[in-house]
Image (cartoon, rainbow, N blue to C red):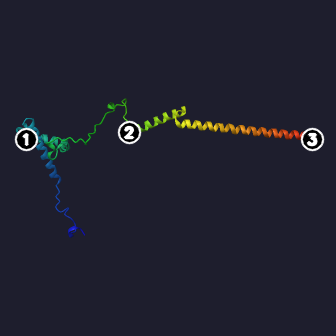
Amino acid sequence: MPKGGRKGGHKGRARQYTSPEEIDAQLQAEKQKAREEEEQEEGGEGATGDPKKEKKSLDSDESDEDDEDYQQKRKGVEGLIDIENPNRVIQTTKKVTQLDLDGPKELSRREREEIEKQKAKERYMKMHLAGKTEQAKADLARLAIIRKQREEAARKKEEERKAKDEAAMAGKRLQSLSLNK
């Protein structure tokens, strides 16, 4: 149950709607006031001017400047004080001829870090291939040990093969000697 024990709230009780004719009349009245103020600022000719000229100007300007005057009209104190909002960025469009393609392109922080990372990796690989890094030295030492082990293993295999060949030759000699007798 809602607060206060009532069903429904206070919203929507006294709504008043303005008709489109009333809105148009208000806009025209505001435009007329603005024009009169402008004419008074320019030289005061609007007060002494012909009313027919004013009607003609109203009729001709009515269709063209309806939207412009309405947008330029500021509410409240805005018309009196020029406020520059530093957070509001006014977008300016650039033409293709104004674009500066030859100038240096500013990179974002992530792009700069990525490029630096790639360059550092390339430098490390060059040093590694030259054998100047600690990892390269350790790899070369390990390779030297492996080479020695492989040479020793190959030498042992060669000796074993020679021993087998000699044993086989000695066995054949014995057989041939025993057959000859």
* 112 or 71, nearer to the observer: 112
Residue found farthest to the left: 48
Extreme residue in the right direction: 181
Q: Residue 47: x and y, percent?
A: 5, 39
Question: Do the residues under discs 2 and 3 have CB atoms within 8 angstroms?
Answer: no
Q: Is residue 6 above or below residue 143?
A: below
Which mark identifies residue 109?
2
Type of the residue with mark 1: Pro
At label 2, counting other C-alpha atoms closer than 10 Å, the crowd grade (few under 14, some 14-19, many 20 or more) is few
Q: Which residue is mark 1?
A: 51
Badge 1 element: helix
| Neighbours of disc 1 within 10 Å: few (<14), some (14-19), many (20+) | few
Q: CA distance from mark 3 to mark 1?
A: 152 Å
Amino acid at the residue labelled 3? Leu
Image coords of residue 90 (percent x, y): 26, 39
Among the two numbered marks 3 and 1 on one chain, the one whose residue lies closer to the N terminus: 1
**Disc 2 to disc 3, how far (Cα)?**
92 Å
Horizontal side, residue 16 vs residue 93: left or right:
left
Q: Which residue is mark 3?
A: 179
Mark in the foreground, 2 or 1: 2
* Residue drawn 15% across the image and 42% down it: 81
**Where residue 178 sits: x, y (%)?**
92, 41
- At a point 15% along the width and 43% down the height, the residue shown is 79
**In the structure shown, which secondary structural element does the residue marked by tag 3 occupy?**
helix
Residue 146 locus on image (x, y percent): 63, 39
Query: Callout 3: 10 Å neighbours few (<14), some, many (20+)?
Result: few
Q: Is residue 124 left or right of residue 153?
A: left
Decide which of 150, 32 is in the foreground and name it: 150
Residue 100, located in which quarter of the rendered image?
Answer: top left
Instruction: Look at label 2 and name its amino acid.
Output: Arg
Quadrant location of the C terminus in the rendered image: top right
Q: Nearer the viewer, mark 3 or mark 1?
A: 3
